């Protein structure tokens, strides 16, 4: 019997609801009543906040599960909502989103080329411009006091303009499988304390190293001042900002914190290789992306996805983004650690999705990193816009997912490397006192376990990674599905 150094594959098996009663218990757990004067601070972790007397608008997709919708409406009204309405893209913009599949991971670079990787997430998820359409609908229907829309993006609230105060949170619950996930009801007290423990070591770091069995190996250094700024701005509930450039960029601070930038961003000099087979859109043949002091210098493999990246890299090689340290189109600008312990790679619509990013759910699981490259605004937004427009440059960034990475920091003044994440396992989940907090809500072993671990042959299950998986991940995953195995 083979023994592997990484945890074995597993996945949850939620049952498709056949009546409203199948969804009501979950809906009631998700709804939180807040005071009339309270404005919830919404992270990417979905909750259904409601005030007494709210008239609620939920912007959803055509494949909305009817039992989920009915259960959510009932739970919201039980907590004080006066009325709950659902509205669909066709009613807002006259058409529905196209059907997409995780077989088309190459599309992420095509979205970048089309300039769709830098708008509001509500626009990105459907590709329909729902942010602006939702704002206009609220203009025409002032009776709505609250709105849920987008699946968990960055600009949703801001895209509502004068109606931003009506934003109550995201709505990723068109899909029944995602709605039923226990990830969304993980105890908030435990969740926030876990995230605090993940961020605290960043402020003490002098060096950082990221490794992954698929081939990633990246390193960089930070000064004491840079490390402290990084720690201060790393918190985004459910989606921690483990990139220094991202955390210290004006784009991020204005988008999520409503702050302006008064210090230069931290280009930490990320150097090494990023490797993998997946992104937000889906899967592709294994790619290797080489970086020298944050700048991408070489691309190997990746099939059509890699070809698209190479094309952009060459076409815009003389780009000099405002304030960046040199020429080049692609810069390392995203290391995000999601923290949803019970999240998973859902199967119900992975080959038939109405999200532009059908592979988005998998990257929300705790311990999974999505690492991005492209550009980020950090100075004046207008300066970036003017430069991009003048040079006809698409803005934004694209990704590679790493499932079993080790993210470790060398603690300043010591030779000790602390593993914030160890082979995909969030180290804080093993802390005895955090498990003690979790015990207030049930059995810690059950609350804090991962429901989903993907199969990587030769790494955590039988097979050869470079032969059986890396050239064609979709073929491998479909074979496992056919055999009744978890993916």
Image: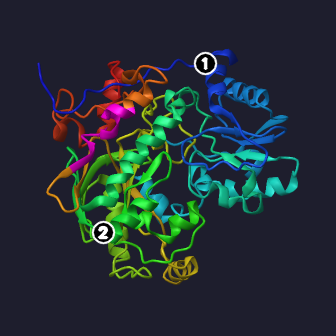
Is residue 21 highlighted in magenta?
Answer: no
Task: Judge by depth and name the residue closer to the eye, 122 or 129.
Answer: 122
Query: Which numbered marker is on residue 224?
Result: 2
Q: Position of residue 109 (x, y in %)?
A: 42, 59
Magenta region, residue range: 418-434
Q: Position of residue 393 (x, y in %)?
A: 48, 75
Helix, strand, or loop for circle 1? loop
Sequence order check, earlier mark of 2 and 1: 1
Please give the name of the residue rendered at 36% of the width and 53% of the height, measured from the top-left corner.
200
Q: Nearer the viewer, mark 2 or mark 1?
A: 2
Q: Is residue 35 left or right of residue 261?
A: right
Helix, strand, or loop for circle 2? helix
- Classify 10 Å Cα crowding around label 1: few (below 14), some (14-19), many (20 and above): some
Q: Quadrant of the N terminus?
A: top left
Cβ atoms at labels 2 and 1 below 8 Å apart:
no
Q: Quadrant of the C terminus?
A: top left
């Amino acid at each position: 019997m083979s023994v592997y150094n990484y945890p074995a594959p597993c996945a949850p098996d939620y049952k498709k609801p056949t009546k409203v009663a199948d969804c009501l218990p979950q809906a009631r757990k998700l709804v939180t009543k807040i005071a009339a004067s309270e404005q919830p601070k919404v992270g990417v972790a979905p909750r259904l906040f409601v005030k007494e007397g709210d008239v609620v608008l939920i912007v959803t997709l055509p494949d909305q599960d009817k039992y989920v919708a009915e259960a959510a409406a009932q739970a919201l009204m039980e907590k004080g909502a006066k009325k709950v309405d659902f509205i669909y893209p066709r009613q807002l913009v006259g058409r529905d989103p196209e059907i997409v599949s995780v077989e088309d991971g190459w599309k992420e670079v095509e979205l970048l080329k089309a300039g769709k990787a830098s708008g509001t997430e509500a626009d990105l998820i459907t590709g329909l411009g729902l942010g602006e359409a939702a704002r206009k609908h609220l203009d025409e229907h002032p009776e709505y006091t609250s709105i849920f829309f987008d699946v968990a993006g960055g600009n949703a609230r801001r895209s509502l303009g004068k109606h931003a105060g009506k934003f109550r949170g995201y709505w990723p619950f068109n899909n029944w499988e995602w709605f039923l996930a226990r990830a969304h009801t993980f105890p908030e007290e435990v969740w926030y304390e876990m995230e605090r423990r993940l961020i605290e070591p960043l402020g003490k770091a002098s060096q950082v190293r990221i490794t992954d069995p698929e081939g990633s190996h990246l390193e960089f250094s930070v000064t004491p001042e840079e490390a402290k700024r990084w720690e201060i701005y790393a918190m985004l509930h459910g989606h921690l900002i483990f990139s220094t450039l991202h955390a210290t960029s004006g784009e991020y601070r204005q988008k999520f914190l409503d702050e302006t930038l008064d210090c230069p961003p931290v280009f930490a000099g990320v150097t090494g290789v990023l490797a993998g087979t997946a992104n937000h859109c889906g899967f592709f043949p294994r790619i290797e992306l080489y970086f020298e002091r944050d700048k991408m210098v070489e691309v190997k493999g990746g099939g059509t996805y890699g070809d698209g990246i190479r094309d952009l890299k060459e076409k815009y090689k003389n780009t000099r983004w405002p304030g960046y340290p040199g020429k080049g189109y692609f810069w390392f600008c995203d290391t995000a650690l999601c923290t949803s312990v019970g999240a998973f790679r859902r199967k119900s619509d992975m080959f038939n999705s109405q999200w532009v990013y059908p592979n988005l759910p998998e990257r929300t699981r705790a311990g999974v990193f999505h690492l991005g490259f492209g550009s980020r605004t950090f100075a004046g937004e207008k300066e970036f816009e003017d430069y991009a427009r003048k040079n006809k440059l698409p803005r934004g960034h694209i990704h590679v997912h790493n499932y079993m990475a080790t993210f470790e920091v060398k603690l300043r003044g010591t030779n000790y490397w602390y593993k914030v994440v160890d082979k995909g396992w969030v180290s804080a989940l093993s802390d005895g006192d955090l498990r003690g907090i979790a015990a207030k809500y049930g059995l810690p072993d059950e609350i804090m376990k991962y429901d989903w671990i993907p199969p990587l042959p030769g790494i955590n299950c039988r097979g050869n990674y470079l032969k059986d998986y890396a050239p064609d991940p979709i073929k491998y995953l479909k074979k496992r599905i056919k055999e009744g195995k978890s993916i």
